[in-house]
Amino acid sequence: MKAEDGVIKECAQAILAINDTMDVLNGRWKVSIIACLCYRPMRFSELLKEVVGISGKMLSRELKDLEMNDLISRKVLNTAPVAVEYSITDYGESLKGLTEKIAEWGFTHRKRVIAGMKKKD
């Protein structure tokens, strides 16, 4: 096997792993939800306020999907009325570095775009 074949195989494996990750984190909201829960457990209503723009129906769907993938856990609190608290699992915590990197890139990108817009004015 040539060295080039090894690089192509390595690239294909990396792309497969990226596709797997994107399948789990697909959609507009999951990474934001995970990022919120990396800082502290939150109730449904808190997440609804924190993740700006998400509807209750969509939040419910995304939380179920994240729970199914063992990234978050759901705890029914013994309160009246009944409240539900969501928290990041140990496995979900492994995504904290990824969310921080995405945020870091986003800050840099925003500055770059704003600087580019100011140059055009």
Image (cartoon, helix red, strand yellow):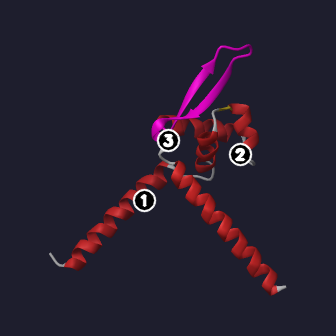
Amino acid type, mark 3: Gly
Which sits in the foreground, 58 or 48? 48
Residue with the mark numbered 2? 51
- Mark 3 falls on what kind of element? helix
Which residue is pictured at 42% across the width and 59% down the height?
18
Q: Quadrant of the C terminus?
A: bottom right
* Residue found 32% across the figure and 62% down from its top: 13
- Does residue 87 show up magenta in the picture? yes
State which quadrant residue 103 falls in: bottom right
Q: Residue 29 vs residue 118: left or right?
A: left
Q: Which quadrant of the figure contains the N terminus?
A: bottom left
- Percent x, y of residue 37: 61, 39
Task: Tell me, yes or no, whether the highlighted magenta stretch contains residue 78.
Answer: yes
- CA gap between label 1 and label 2 equals 25 Å
As rendered, which of 73 and 105 lies closer to the eye?
105
Region of the chain picked out in magenta, as a range = 71-91
Q: Secondary structure at mark 1?
A: helix
The answer to whether mark 1 and mark 3 are in CB contact below 8 A is no
Question: From mark 3 to mark 2, how far is it between C-alphas?
Answer: 18 Å
Crowding at dot 2, Cα within 10 Å, few <14 / some 14-19 / many 20+, comes out as some
| Amino acid under disc 1 | Ile
Whether residue 53 appears in this view of the structure is yes
Q: Which mark is residue 18?
A: 1
Which mark is drawn over residue 92? 3
Name above or below for residue 2 compared with residue 10: below
- Left or right placement of residue 66 versus residue 50 in this view: left
